[in-house]
Amino acid sequence: MNVQDHLLVHGKIEPIDILAIGPHPDDIEIGAAGSLLKWIEAGQTVGLVDLTQGEIGTKGTGEERIAESKEAANRLGAAFRANLGLTDGSVADDLSSRERLVRVIRQSKPKWVLSNLEEDHHPDHTAGARLVKSAYFLARLPKFLDSLSPHSPEGLFYYLIHSFDPPTFLVDTSAFFEKKIETLSAYTTQFIDPKLPENYRHTGISDYLKSVRTLGEAWGIQAGCDSAEAFIADKPLILEDLTHAGKRAK
Ligand SMILES: [Zn+2]
């Protein structure tokens, strides 16, 4: 397998501060677009990786979703967006997938990696989070895929898409919420003009933008602000002093 084993949707893979990874185009935005917008405005650089094209999703085709994810990357201000091209519905934490993802991690050299949470009803979300965890670890091992230099990111954080798992930290995204909705709205087939078969049964509510808004407001109550996003760290965060501990949102 060569270094082109992903589809480059937007920009080119280059060193960035934050690498956000999601199983399907739109998962990153649902869970973390507000925080990414905030961090980009603060000067951080962001790369995006979708594991699949979402081609077996009930709404839209793989081609439509790739085009939508390109537009969303533009609206977000990401440096690049790659699509790993794994089979939608059959994502697995296997050797070939690990190699593909490790290549992107080593080429983009992120300080921090973001993933969806493993506990989820969608099998791609469960397997995808496991795959990210494996690749995050393997990227630092010199003898794994030794054609590329190893890279050790500083932290792995899981963004919450629709669950209320206790977070490690919250990000006040109030000032970026409308821009988050604008970014999500790039996914026309998913949120703006969804075409569903008759009697389709949603796992949640049909108005997903409302769901995103409500969840953001719920975390906002915890953070003391209008809207927030929630993250779980894969290991305890280290504080050098208590300046930021327990700080309320401004
Ligand atoms: Zn998904």
Image (cartoon, rainbow, N blue to C red):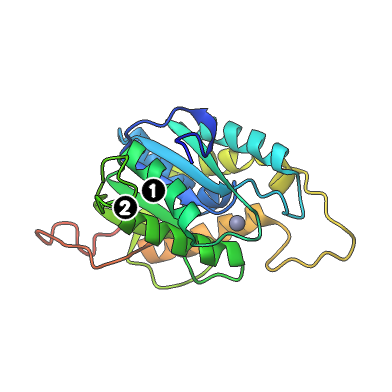
Left or right of 107 on screen, residue 11? right
Badge number at residue 50 = none
Q: Nearer the viewer, residue 160 or 84?
A: 84
Q: Residue at x 26, y 54 (%)?
A: 141
Image position of 24 with respect to 128: above or below: above
Indicate the secondary structure of the residue bearing disc 2: loop
Query: Which amino acid does the dot numbered 2 rest on?
Result: Phe
Q: Which residue is mark 2?
A: 144
Q: Residue at x 73, y 54 (%)?
A: 56
Q: Residue at x 39, y 66 (%)?
A: 222
Query: Which amino acid does the dot numbered 1 rest on?
Result: Val
Whether residue 228 can be seen here: no
Q: Nearer the viewer, residue 169 or 87?
A: 87
Image position of 48 with respect to 207: above or below: above
Q: Which residue is mark 1?
A: 102
Instruction: For marks 1 and 2, give the one nearer the viewer.
Output: 2
Q: Residue at x 39, y 38 (%)?
A: 46
CA distance for labels 1 and 2: 9 Å
Image position of 199 with respect to 172: above or below: below
Indicate the secondary structure of the residue bearing disc 1: helix
Residues at circles 1 and 2 in contact by the CB criterion of under 8 Å: yes
The image position of residue 100, as x and y in percent, is 46, 46
